[in-house]
Amino acid sequence: MSGSAKPDNRQKGLVSREQRESLNAQRGQVLWLTGLSGAGKSTLAYALEARLYQLGRRCVVLDGDNLRSGLCADLGFTPAARHENLRRAAEVAKLFAETGMICIAAFISPTYLDRAMVREVVGPDDFSEVYLDCSLQVCEARDVKGLYQRARAGEIADFTGITSPYEPPLQPALTLMTSSLSIEDCVQQLIECLG
Amino acid sequence: MSGSAKPDNRQKGLVSREQRESLNAQRGQVLWLTGLSGAGKSTLAYALEARLYQLGRRCVVLDGDNLRSGLCADLGFTPAARHENLRRAAEVAKLFAETGMICIAAFISPTYLDRAMVREVVGPDDFSEVYLDCSLQVCEARDVKGLYQRARAGEIADFTGITSPYEPPLQPALTLMTSSLSIEDCVQQLIECLG
């Protein structure tokens, strides 16, 4: 891939990643939560973040809401714009991981290619893919944001699960059946996944 | 400005900014270093970061080199692309400040409008503008990256200080005369500026 061939101009820092991680007493890394809209990505991301803070660990949540209101406010929802949204999310996640933080990224990221790209950007050693496995039926019944209803009414183009595909991860680091597990159980498994 | 009118969908977090800052025992904020190419922005940014780490504080440096090799790798150097580069830098700086980190941003950011925009994005309460005041003569004599020579040869369009203007800040939080002060003196003043 081109990633490793890019010139790395980022060698000027005087503080090593190891020093940053030592100060924070944790390993910088990215937990990437993928799944359908309504599968519980943001809910779990924020619940995990709260639990990690109780444990004195430093983390940050990136999701569509906080990126699309700022860094990605210029992007729409075409396939190309969605891809760029994920690329920027991955680049920011990488910056956080490099400073010794745990970055919890919550994005539908529906395709193999999307997730291969974000893994490549972050770097595979720092990247753990977590699949929030929840049936379309359950997600659509929840419809917290009313998006499924709008998608069924034809008001949203390319809505994942309805009019565009979701490709479940083939080898995720962790799969969570969010329709049957409690939030607490999910958070516990995520913490074990962090190592 | 439109910033305050934008819907803020980022209220889902369970960890407050105060909790993050308390855990880090510091205030999240952005120090924005502006000045000509060769004025010492990245050098000072990394020297400050190293000193802050010795003091147990959490920080991150954002500069053209680490953003343009990743998040902004899709951007060229037209005025519009440069503006977008700064906008993204400011959005990322804001994300770091919100997690309770000290973000040291080192960008030429030559115009009043550029810097008004980044201040607006970050939020004025978290933003300190630092002007690295160094004459064009000194910067051009240093020419660490050989850019001034290339600009004089006409190989670089719109090179700040040569073929496009640098507008010095009118009311910076701090001005550092980098041609006469030592790095250590500058770092000390920057630490005092952080408060």
Image (cartoon, coloured by chain):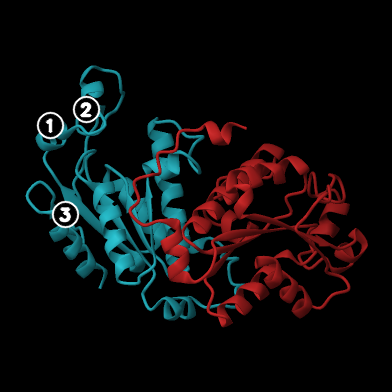
Chain colours: A red, B cyan
* Secondary structure under the numbered disc 2 in the rendered image: helix
What residue is disc 3 on?
A: B183
Q: Amino acid at mark 3?
A: Ile
Question: What residue sits right under mark 2 in the picture?
Answer: B148
Of residue A151 and residue A91, the one placed in the foreground of this image is A91
Question: Is B170 on the left-hand or right-hand side of A188?
Answer: left
Tell me if B15 is positioned left or right of B119 in this view: right
In the picture, measured across the screen, residue A19 lies left or right of residue A111, that is left
Which amino acid, mark 1? Ala
* Callout 1: SS: helix
- Parent chain of label 3: B
Secondary structure found at label 3: helix
Residue B84 makes an appearance in the image: no
User: Mark 2 near mark 3, Cβ–Cβ under 8 Å?
Assistant: no
Nearer-N-terminus badge (2/3): 2
Could you say where residue B35 lies in the image, as x and y percent from the top left? Answer: 22, 45
Residue A138, image x, y percentages: 90, 66
- Residue at label 1? B141
At 36% from the left and 57% from the top, the residue drawn is: A15
